[in-house]
Image (cartoon, rainbow, N blue to C red):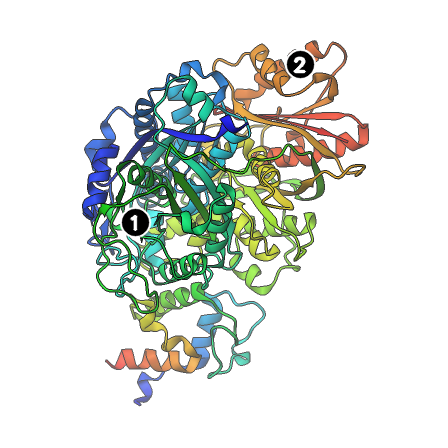
Amino acid sequence: MSARFPVITGLGVIATPGVGVDTIWSAVSSGVSGLKPLSLFQSPRYGQIPVGEVQKDLLALGAPAKSSRSDKLGWLAARDAIEDAKIDLRNCGDRAGILLGTSVGGSFDSENFLTNLIKYGKMRARPTRFHECISTVNVIADGFGLYGPGMAIATACSSSALAIAQAAEMILSGEADVMLAGGADSLSRMTWGGFHSLLLVDSAGCRPFDAARSGMSLGEGAAILVLESEEFARQRGAKILARLTGWGMSCDAYHATAPHPQGAGATAAMQSALHRANLQPSEIDYVNAHGTGTRDNDLAEAIALKTLFHNRVPPFSSTKRVFGHALAASGAMEAVVCVEALRRQQLPPNPGFEKCDPTIGLVPVTESHHAQLTHVMSNSFGFGGNNGVLIFSQPEVFPQTRLPEKIEIAVNGTGAIVPGAVVEKEITAPLPQGRGLVYSCGTLDVSSLNPNQRRRLSRLQQMALITARQSHAPDASERVAVAIGTGLGCLEDAGAFIENLISKDEREPMPARFPNSVHNSPAGQVAIDQNARGMNCAPTVGEITFECALWQGISQLAANEADCALVGAADEVDKYLLSIGQRWRVWNDKIKPGEGAVVVNVVRAKTNSPAAKISALKIGRWRKPFEAAREADWIESAIDLKKVGLILSGAGGLSQIEVFYQSLAAELAKRRGDRLEHQTYKQFCGEFHAASAFGFSRAVALAREKTCGVLLVTLSANGGKAICLIEP
Amino acid sequence: MDAAMQVSTRELKQKIIESLKLQDITPDQIDDEAPLFGTGLGLDSIDALELVVLLEKEYGIVIKDIEEGRPAFRSVKTLAEFIAAKRAA
């Protein structure tokens, strides 16, 4: 088992200073700010404010043309990381996967669609093809041949720290031998206008921890690490750059945007990472701080550092002024900084700092200099009070990382808001006029929510809150983790925010809507409502989003970081989704868009408990062209088909994958040797990313009703696949 | 203060209710001098930003630093005085 410790064997990075680890390190160590006025798009109001934009010519370095700006950034970092690791992925089969933090996804490109539509009345839907956050994972996995688990996590500014932590979990638990892990995010009008609407941008460029700091600077880019199990890396003779020995995740459960004023969640995440690594605070030689430069973050983070390290805070610095804050990519970029600091035994400075803030009372590293570094820590904190902390160590260190346990998982409660009926929804101007039929949840009964939840939360967040309450009653003695994913997030709020930005040229923004645009906003609100301070995650993985949330929740139970995990998925329909689908003829007599939310409360199974058990869960990517026999082999490698009495699948939805579902079900029935019933669920709920969560709740009911094992099979049109075996 | 510079607190309250989507509250229920944040109406930092937008939209007053608005956001009365002072300036 110890041979499964995760090691880092390759790095790839692209950001405003340039491309490649050496270029980035030279900017980091000299403390040069890469911030310049924006040129990527017109910003009538904030055009002169400095930002960390990636130079145009760098993006042309071989990235696939058919992809979003975020995808291109991610692809370039992935290519360099794979080259650096000197790994031949063709030898890895389905043992190599990818886990990325992406928060903005293809929004920048989708905004071009909206600008054309709003300003010129033209419907050019093509740029929205890469809108989803999972797109970057798909582009990289297809491009480099990765058939292991593929996931994207969207928890705003902590996304890639969570992605790297969970990739490590995948390796440690034996789900994969190799994981590309990191993050990619491009600049977008939405985040640019959004952070300005929150008055969180420093017009002089960010000055982390400085007395005069007045906000962050935005940036963009991508960074990807090649993580491998030590055994795999040694067998192939790879050079080990560093180890990932600890990781910790937590939630403030305090506010949508503001950090906990005492940094309680940040402290908890650092403690959790130290616990995982089996290290004492005194063993940490350097902290790469989140240090955005906002008044509140830096103060709360400083308090957290002082709480954890007492009066012996190790050397720390924020490198945000070098890169700008690249949101979901920033944790991965700073992971690269940490690995390089270890390799070079150099402390990175904190550009922008001049004068100590007496309320903070700490001085970061001001000049790069040599230091003995054995263990270093990297902090990433995001909207929704979402915290991720990573600990990197020298390759020579023998890791003491705590291992996950093999446990049985039981379903302890389910909450569901599912479509009740097909309703007709009007598509309003400026889109092409028309009507669409939607499997709708109808009007939500929000009477149980408090006035602030009623007035400020989006429909999607409200659905998540209500279903989470149905599945779980808060208990102060319990440690609760949350993983509630979404394919497309709060479409209505994000759409309204961008529409307003474009049509009013950045005047009169909508600051209350912006925090709802992040995909972890439902999970974050559930955490506040349930006082859930464990990991808080929002996977966004197309049709298999729910299964990924389930995996994330289970891994927290197996690591004994939580007593209970609230896992789920939610999606909503808006006018743009409806009309783009109409344009592409996705919707027809059989296939209608749907919406809904399901949250499941999972726990460690107790002996003799009547609850349904989840006896297998596996996530991967199917190979193109689809071959039923190969996929059936993959399923049989995880489960004994004799335990399956019924297959429940997502067939009956998207036409591209319908035939795959049918052939796979037939192949499994053939192998099982006798009658194997195949049922579907999309005829009840319509087509939406979170639909497999509804499938899961149905599978639990069917397993009980028929007292047999139910195999939930989900395929995503873009390559994801998942199986889950539920037994009564 | 010049009467023309004065801001009707009733009108202001109505605008606050609309812009913050306050539920089940009428202008009469908001005391001119009651604190808007923390206790009182229980508003938070995101509501403060919505008030910044309200000031820009309705009164043409642009606030670039939330610290600048902080004293004005104490109550409806201080907000009305702030608007009047900005208009007079």
Q: Position of residue A6 (x, y in %)?
A: 45, 31
Q: Position of residue A297 (x, y in %)?
A: 38, 58
Instruction: Please identify the quarter of the rendering in which residue A244 is found.
Output: top left
Mark 2 or mark 1, which is nearer the start of the sequence?
1
Q: Nearer the viewer, residue A92 or A112?
A: A92
Given the image, what chain letter belongs to the residue carrying mark 1? A
Against A350, residue A164 (above or below) is above
Residue A669 appears left or right of A398: right
Which element type, helix, strand or loop, lies under badge 1? loop
Question: Residue under circle 2?
Answer: A668
**Quadrant into which the N terminus of chain A falls:** top right
Q: Amino acid at mark 2?
A: Leu
**Residue A218: assigned label:** 1
Estimate the spatial distance between the alpha carbons at disc 1 and disc 2, rounded to whole Å.
50 Å
Q: Residues within 10 Å of mark 1 (few under 14, many from 20)?
A: many
Q: Residue at x 71, y 37 (%)?
A: A410
